[in-house]
Image (tube, helix red, strand yellow):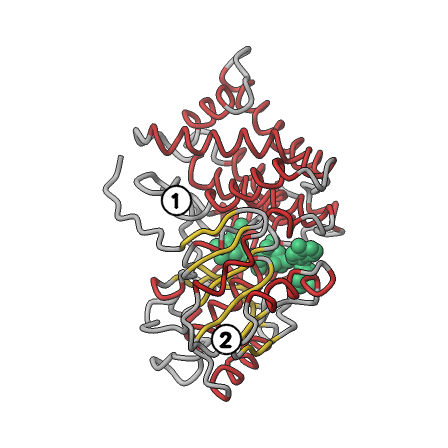
Amino acid sequence: MNNFTLNTPTKILFGNGQIANLAREIPANARILITYGGGSIKKNGVLDQVLKALEGRPVFQFAGIEPNPTYETLMKAVEVVKAEKIDFLLAVGGGSVADGTKFIAAAARYTAAADPWDILLTTGAKVSSAVPMGCVLTLPATGSESNNGAVISRASSGDKLPFFSPWTYPVFAVLDPVTTYSLPPRQIANGIVDAFVHTVEQYLTYPAEGKVQDRFSEGLLLTLIEEGPRALAEPENYAVRANVMWSATQALNGLIGAGVPQDWTTHMLGHELTAMHGLDHAQTLAVVLPSVLQYKKEQKRAKLLQYAERVWNLREGTEDQRIDQAIQATRAFFEQLGVRTRMADYGLDGSSIPAMIAKLKEHGSTALGEHRDITLEDSQRILEAAR
Ligand code: NZQ
Ligand code: ZN
């Protein structure tokens, strides 16, 4: 196991009715900006619950943070933060709202460059302050509610880039599984795939004697396999939604990745697919992951065999057969949830692959994977095999 420093400072308020308790997590005199997306929180009553909990506080609202949040929209919120002297941000929504709010929080206090897009160009390294924020999560998927990362798009340039900063951990996150009942099947499926792939990116590398991390990861994968289809079949089953929600948070709050190698190739290639073609984040992961696993089969052999046995209960046949069956089972799981796994399923013929590779190069993603040995040529082959 490698050395690690783990800090997961976000306080979690988990369960039905917890939105009512959020006011005590926000300083009493704070001027609060509620940030949200296209309006789902108005339809499902979550905004009303939040406003009730904050009754009597100075509350402002910023709506319209889109899926794959854009710099262009978020900079408008930065203006509101400055004009209204906001000192607490409350993100209410999915990963896009949480991510977008992290950017707003950091951009409003950014001094290292005139244009806060610099935060993305420097992956957050120069962020030295941020407006504190909390989160009311309505879509279990990204883990953004309790990690320090965000992925921001820039419509004008076709870029989608991540940043990380110790300043952008949400102070608290409210996770009420009931808020997820209104999710359309596509989004619940997306969330399960995203959480699954987050786990795989931190697990399916090479053995590092991280027995605790491995078994935590396997527990999350088994839970998602068990509860994912049920979450679609029984949308108001509280226990199922609670397990999905907690799995998604745990999949990317730092715990399972501490002290072990990590991959993230699937995410980096996936972000280019979203930036160029607008696919949902999880759709890109479902397309790319099987191809990455197949392409890196030799380097990942030991962990693929462990994955086959412990997650998919595959114990018969040769090593290669078990590995192929495990990759096939992964693909079939995504398809079972309704998330298609080939570029062609989304009307893409692969002709844009060279342009995506050029963007990867521009973004410095020239040595990906747990061994940093996935070159641009390898990424090209991985994408070609995903057609
Ligand atoms: O905008 P509204 O109207 O709220 O509708 C949203 C949106 O259209 C809807 N929705 C959310 N909660 C709902 C709901 N509809 C009904 N009922 C509810 N309870 O769902 C749609 C998608 O929302 P979005 O926030 O975009 O989805 P998700 O949570 O999957 O977030 C995806 C974004 O997170 C980034 C992705 O790249 C993508 O931009 N990621 C962030 C990560 C992080 N910070 O650690 C890691 C991830 O790997 C990922 O890259
Ligand atoms: Zn993801």
Q: Residue furthest top?
A: 316
Q: Secondary structure at mark 2?
A: strand
Residue 278 visible, this orientation: no
In the picture, measured across the screen, residue 283 lies left or right of residue 311, that is right
Q: Identify the image quadrant of residue 9.
A: bottom left
Numbered circle sitting on residue 32: 2
Relative image position of residue 126 (x, y in whole percent)? 33, 72
Q: Identify the image quadrant of residue 327.
A: top right
Give the residue type at disc 1: Asp
The residue at which mark 1 appears reads as 373
Relative image position of residue 269 (x, y in whole percent)? 54, 52
Q: Residue furthest bottom?
A: 83
Residue that appears at 72% across and 41% down: 235
* Number of marks in the rendered image: 2
Q: Residues within 10 Å of mark 1 (few under 14, many from 20)?
A: few
Specify the quarter for ligand 1. bottom right
Q: Residues within 10 Å of mark 2 (few under 14, many from 20)?
A: many
Q: Which quadrant: the C terminus?
A: top right
Q: Identify the image quadrant of residue 365.
A: bottom left
Residue that appears at 71% across and 34% down: 336
Relative image position of residue 288 (x, y in whole percent)? 58, 44
Q: Which quadrant: the N terminus?
A: top left
Relative image position of residue 332 (x, y in whole percent)? 67, 31
Residue that appears at 66% across and 65% down: 48
- Indicate whether 275 appears above or below 187: below
Q: Which is closer to the viewer, label 2 or label 1?
A: 2
Give the residue type at disc 2: Ile
